[in-house]
Amino acid sequence: MSKLVVVIPTYNEKENTKRIIVKLRRTFLKLKKWNPQILIVDGNSPDGTSIVVKTLSQKYKNVHLLLEPQKRGLGAAYLSGMKHAFGRLKAEIAVTMDADLSHDPVCLPKILNKIETGSDFVVGSRYIKGGSIPKNWPLHRKFLSIFGNLATQLLLESRAINDWTTGYRAFRKEVFQKVVPVMEKDAAFKGYTFNISFAYHTIEAGFKVSQVPINFIDRTAGDSKLGMEYLFYTPIFLVKTRLKKFLSV
Ligand SMILES: Nc1nc2c(ncn2[C@@H]2O[C@H](COP(=O)(O)OP(=O)(O)OP(=O)(O)O)[C@@H](O)[C@H]2O)c(=O)[nH]1
Ligand SMILES: [Mg+2]
């Protein structure tokens, strides 16, 4: 059975983390072809998220904790989580998702089915038929997400995917091995740039990419970590990448 590690970054998600672990373990019962594991990458949350995970990891063999020294941003958490998943935990496939239950574990079999049928990189997309963003999102949040994704598509000149910022994804070890060294040269790890850059370099490298519709559920517990720095670094990354592409033609 192929090893699969679900990498979940957390910062002050005590309540959500417990719930997502329970939900994921229930979904795992349906994954007959996989040996699924959970890796929580906690940014040393002051609310004690790591204590909850430590307790659960002693109870369940497939729950693991990677404790960061401090909050270092989403990209840094993804990166150390992926390194741990493909290194120490010997994963063949990694899945990334948020802890706040915005990404429904119920979609996991559908996403993995795409991997089983030959995809290298699968994104859970809110912007294809069957996918959605929360109806109750404030107008500015809807605008930022929709406009951000359209601008990314235009500037990077790629229609391979419709949702560049989604954190619900699955990919093979080969994708990680090829893409991360390229990204490390770019130092593109700030906020949403990690997700955009990871998808962009995967597509540029010629991997087989596919999408599965997801309905993004608004968080009901804990606070959003979506800060201004996320809005600041993304346009800079997009313009820089566009210029590099233009100059290399
Ligand atoms: N380890 C770590 N995890 C983080 C950090 N920032 C955010 N996270 C986690 O990354 C996931 C995504 O962050 P969210 O705050 O939910 O961002 P979002 O989903 O874009 O925003 P909302 O829809 O408002 O929740 C959550 O599980 C967070 O707890 C960080 O600096 N370090
Ligand atoms: Mg969230």
Image (spheres, rainbow, N blue to C red):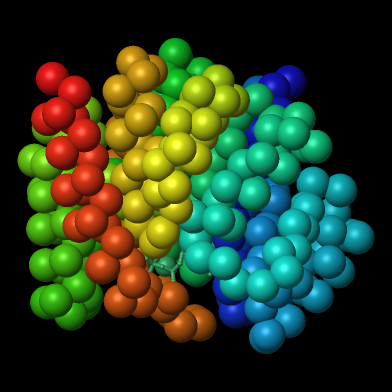
- In the foreground, 39 or 155: 155
Residue located 66% across and 40% down the image: 83
114 lies above or below 13 = above
86 lies above or below 76 = above
Quadrant placement of the N terminus: top right
Give the x, y percent position of residue 209. Answer: 34, 24
- In the foreground, 19 or 55: 55
* Any part of residue 29 in sight: no
Give the x, y percent position of residue 85. Answer: 69, 39
- In the foreground, 183 or 161: 183
Q: Residue furthest front?
A: 247
Residue located 43% across and 76% down the image: 225
* Any part of residue 244 in sight: yes
Residue located 35% across and 52% down the image: 193
Q: Is residue 208 left or right of residue 64?
A: left
- In the foreground, 28 or 159: 159
Residue located 86% across and 69% down the image: 55
10 lies above or below 209 = below
For ligand 2, which image quadrant applies? bottom left
Give the x, y percent position of residue 125. Answer: 29, 44
Residue 77 picture quarter: bottom right
How many numbered dots are placed on residues in this image? 0
Give the x, y percent position of residue 199. Answer: 35, 36
Q: Residue furthest bottom?
A: 47
Q: Is residue 78 left or right of residue 14?
A: left
